[in-house]
Image (cartoon, grey):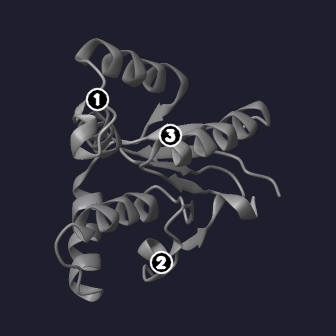
Amino acid sequence: MDLSGTRIDGNRVVFGGHEHPFACHSTRRSAASSSQHVLARLANDGTLLHYTPQNIAEMWNAMTRPTTRNGLGLSVVDADREVRAIETGMILLPDSEAVYREWRRIIVRHSVLGVQVHDARLAASMIVHGVLSILTFNVADFSRFTGLTALHPSNI
């Protein structure tokens, strides 16, 4: 399977690009480790990696939240180092009015409630930027979004 391109979302990493755009969604250390393995393999295969501002905001939240509250407990310095690595090795996909309009369409069309708005925003960004598949540990979270294909990392 040719995977050309990638983008991340705070607790998710999205793959996008040429023929087979994908994304990866993870929140726990073991899942993150698995994600990093997949990302390293994709990068070694020449996959372009992309991220959005939402990715960084969600990552910062998870990285700096105390471990007692299901976070990673990183310091600001350590979290900043992680973000800088992403900024150095990946391409920013900017937010835009088009992403906002697509998000609004998605949340109404799919009756999105509560924290699911974050997945809907990622889906909107993916659609606008032409990233139509997502590699995720939570396939069901993205399966309702028309035009997107959700795949588990074990299937790659």
Q: Residue drawn at (39%, 15%), measured in percent from left and top? A: 81
Q: Is residue 54 left or right of residue 153?
A: left
**Which is nearer the eye, 53 or 76?**
76
Q: Do the residues bearing badges 2 and 3 touch, measured as CB atoms within 8 Å? A: no
Q: Residue drawn at (53%, 72%), measured in percent from left and top? A: 139
- Crowd tier of the residue under label 2, counting other residues whose Cα lies within 10 Å: few below 14, some 14–19, many 20 or above: few
Give the x, y percent position of residue 147: 52, 78
Q: CA distance from mark 1 to mark 2?
A: 28 Å
Q: Residue drawn at (28%, 47%), measured in percent from left and top? A: 95
What residue is disc 2 on?
140
Q: CA distance from mark 3 to mark 1?
A: 25 Å
**Location of residue 6 with respect to 111 vertically, above or below:** above
Which quadrant: the N terminus?
bottom right
Marked residue nearer the N-terminal end (2 or 3): 3
Q: Nearer the viewer, mark 1 or mark 2?
A: 1
Q: Is residue 150 left or right of residue 65?
A: right
Q: CA distance from mark 2 to mark 3?
A: 23 Å
**Location of residue 1 with respect to 106 vertically, above or below:** above
Marked residue nearer the N-terminal end (1 or 2): 1
**Location of residue 69 with respect to 115 vertically, above or below:** above
Q: Could you tell me which secondary element the residue under label 1 belongs to?
A: loop
Give the x, y percent position of residue 93: 41, 42
Q: Return the residue found at the far right.
A: 1
What residue is disc 1 on?
73
Q: Return the residue found at the far top.
A: 77
Q: Look at label 3 and name its amino acid.
A: His
Q: Could you tell me which secondary element the residue under label 2 belongs to?
A: helix
Q: Look at label 1 and name its amino acid.
A: Gly
Q: Look at label 2 and name its amino acid.
A: Ala
What residue is disc 3 on?
50
